[in-house]
Image: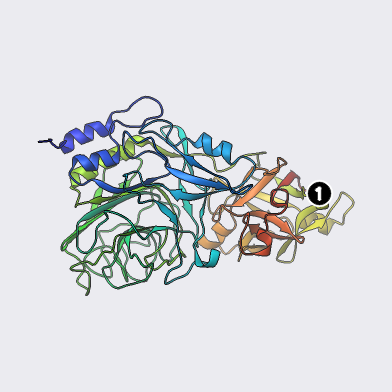
Amino acid sequence: MVSQTTPHRAHALALALLATGSLVAAGPCDIYSSGGTPCVAAHSTTRALYSSYSGSLYQVKRGSDNATTNIAPLSAGGVANAATQDSFCAGTTCLITIIYDQSGRGNHLTQAPPGGFNGPDSGGYDNLASAIGAPVTLNGQKAYGVFISPGTGYRNNAASGTAKGDAAEGVYAVLDGSHYNGACCFDYGNAETSSRDTGNGHMEAIYYGNCNVWGTGSGSGPWFMADLENGLFSGANPKNNAADPSISYRFVTTALKGEPNQWALRGGNAASGSLSTYYSGVRPSASGYNPMSKEGAIILGIGGDNSNSAQGTFYEGVMTSGYPSDATENSVQANIVAAKYATTSLTSGPALSVGSHISLRATTSCCTTRYIAHTGSTVNTQVVSSSSATALKQQASWVVHAGLGNSACFSFESVDTPGSYIRHYNFGLQVNASDGSKQFNEDATFCPQAGLNGQGNSIRSWSYPTRYFRHYDNDLYIASNGGVDTFDATGLYNDDVSFVISSGFA
């Protein structure tokens, strides 16, 4: 007979640090296994979730030649080797194409296919995430999360070993508590195998955001809730559980579990402290949720029918067989805290100074006398020089501010139209007056990095990190390196998205 590790023993293992490159003696899935509820799916782009795991964490594809490479931990049980990605993706763009399942069951996550709610691009397939949109450190070592913009999603409709029907399961995820919206649905967990809404109780997935169409917690959100299909639930009451708090930690641990006529929501700060129980009790009273009819597919960043208007950031998560004990989840939380998730720089290349006035010159050979300017609300490039009219110099000059939507990046205010900023709208760049909304602030936030063609800076959208400032037929867009729009064309992409930043003309 093999004895199980006690919760206290699992907790001690979770806190035992190993040498550089390996975070803990026992990973989250080792702890779940010790508790009798083994992982049947384990996904992370930041680290290994088993102490012995040294295989691939995820795959990236670069835009220059569509070549792919796999990113593994630095050592067994350790943090992802971000240097491999940085080297492979240098001078081009990269997308996350596969998030590998570490459980050995082959439950990998790939580009989500069309569903009841089709994706915007790729014939209905969802978009893939930028490989650099969510940099973090774990115990001081750099890694990358999965930054989900609206229209982005991953899925596996043929998963093995996941809960079906009313079978018991647990799910946890570590997320970015500052990246969310009110759209449907930023989920991770169990969903329909058809990518379509097949009825109440056919899902059991973690949801994070401030959507208030179905249910809510206390305050104005964002909330951690359960997407059980045709409802986001914070408790037994279909509409509200006042004990489910608004959560604003930068790194959030979310834990959902369910078994026949019993389910629970638990969560906390992924960087410190313990888990709190927000709900534990019977299934919702509405029809179809007792018993459940789970189907066993796995989703990330989307709803069960491929509803893909939500945003969020995923770092790690698992699905288990069986209903984990609170003690087991507490040990997993201790492990997560010991991983020491922390923020790191979102920018690179020539530095910008808040408060400075700048102008941005194109580097494509056709256009080296053209600068980013605006005509009314339209952002474009115009030929500007020291002898240009004062009005044109002002139109081609911008005031640098800390990012309105994320202060780790930047926003650019028009010199000649104070209070108006460059923002993206339907992927075009405009100069609009700030309305102070969360949406505007995020649309007006951009993260400079070293220029993709080796000159100056390339400036990517914070909220759509696959997309960069690009001049195309003299107008400005946030463009991806390949896509359905003409301004996404791959030809001259690196040149068109690279700008030399200098002191402003005005």
- Quarter of the view holding residue 258: bottom left
Q: How is the image coloured?
A: rainbow
Quarter of the picture containing the N terminus is: top left
286 and 430: which is toward the camera: 286
Observer-nearest of 453 and 352? 453
Dot 1 alpha-carbon crowd within 10 angstroms: few under 14, some 14 to 19, many 20 or more: few
Residue furthest to the left in view is 1
The relative height of residue 240 versus residue 61 in the rendered view (above or below) is: below
Residue 2 drawn above or below residue 501:
above
Residue 465 spot, x, y in % from top left: 56, 52
Q: Residue furthest top?
A: 19
Pointer 1: what residue?
Answer: 365
- State how many labels appear: 1
Q: Position of residue 365 (x, y in %)?
A: 81, 49
- Identify whether 195 is placed above or below 275: below
Residue 182 falls in image quadrant: bottom left
Q: Is residue 437 visible?
A: no
Mark 1: secondary structure: helix
Quadrant position of residue 354: top right
Expressed as whole percent of the image width and height from the top left, the position of residue 356 reads 69, 45
| Location of residue 379 in the rendering, given as x and y in whole percent from the top left corner | 72, 61
Towards the viewer: 68 or 433: 68
> Residue sitting at 19 percent across and 63 percent down?
166
Identify the residue at the far right of this view: 387
Residue 44 in the figure: left or right of residue 377:
left
Question: Viewed as shown, does residue 23 lie left or right of 72?
Answer: left
Q: Is residue 227 visible in this depiction of the protein?
A: yes
Tell me the amino acid under the disc marked 1.
Ser
